Amino acid sequence: MNCSANFADMRRTLLHVLLVLLPVWGSAQEIQARVDILSNKISSQVDRKVFLTLQSGLTNFINSRKWTTDVVQANERIQCSFLLTLSQDLGSNVYKGSLTVQAARPAYNTSYVSPLLNFQDDNLVFKYVEYQPIEFNENRVQGNDPLVANLTATIAYYINIILGLDYTSFSLRGGDPYFQKAWNIVNNAPDAKDISGWKSFDGLRNRYWLAENLNNNRFALFHDALYAYYRTGLDVFYENEEAGRNGIINALSYLNTVRTENLNSMIIPIFFQGKGNELYKLFSKANGEQKARAKELLTKLDITNLSLYNTL
């Protein structure tokens, strides 16, 4: 890592626990991903073998590619999963579906992993012919056929989002280069009639807005919050629970400032996706003052889990 030796040692300690949780795939680099494809909604006239070939190809593409310039040990690989659920066969080897992306980050000195990203992208249309090369060139994102390029551009985009979130959780603003790469993919994204999700007018929760929020200085405090949540929160729980909870409360305070200054932004619900039970458990045994402050902030920030937080 481009960090101090102490930082690298800490990260190795944090990540080694994940080796027992997921199998190892081949020659993984920074990423250790599981890829699954659900095709039961596609006509039985389509040979299912093509989807198994695609699944294998995507797994190899993600896990074998060098996504950063850092030297990464096997136990430092970031754990994530990609679930591609196909909903329509549009003909001529073109498919429509959704992509669920999940990534986790371990808490220091424990076997617990906390969700970094848990997002479903409902706007994926792509073309795949069995055995076609699965490639991505960040200097030529569109490729020769936008519909072919759209799948790998989307995967590469989310890999960089995951890298950015992971690096920021260990080093303040450490993920900025990867958020910028994701933004570059947005700005050079494949463009065709059936492709969506890359433009500001394609919706309020899409690839465009996620990358925009992560690169916009209006959301600078989000990066502080992500770092504080893990490094001064979850990572110190093993030795001082009260200090850990205070670190998380500080992170929630930063997020509340972001929410107040940027109403209806995408980044706040993205942060809390999958974290409801984690936060409830973290504060269910807190002292009265911490519990009250956490409840005050969480009921503003994470409306989806309002009923859960109200029981604190």
Image (cartoon, rainbow, N blue to C red):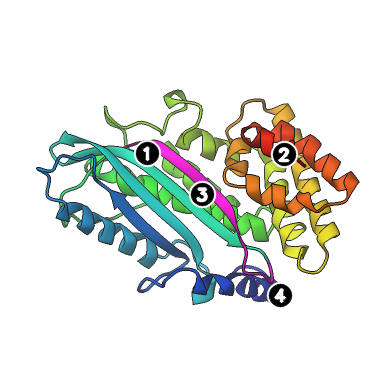
Mark 1 crowdedness (10 Å alpha carbons): few <14, some 14-19, many ≥20: many
As drawn, the label of residue 6 is 4
Residue at the image point whose x is 78% and y is 39% from the top: 295
Residue 44 visible in this rendered orientation of the protein: yes
In reply to whether residue 111 is colored magenta, the answer given is yes
> Which residue is label 1 attached to?
189
Image quarter of residue 254: top right
- From the image, state whether disc 1 or disc 3 is nearer to you: 3
Q: Earlier in the sequence, mark 1 or mark 4?
A: 4
Mark 3 and mark 4 residues within 8 Å of each other at the beta carbon: no
Image quarter of residue 310: top right
As drawn, the label of residue 164 is none
Task: Give the magenta-colored segment's residue range.
Answer: 108-124
Residue 41 locus on image (x, y percent) = 23, 39
What predominant SS class does the magenta segment belong to?
Answer: strand
- Image quadrant holding the C terminus, namely top right
Q: Earlier in the sequence, mark 2 or mark 1?
A: 1
Horizontal side of 176 relative to 90 (left or right) equals: right
Residue extending furthest toward the front: 311
As drawn, the label of residue 309 is 2
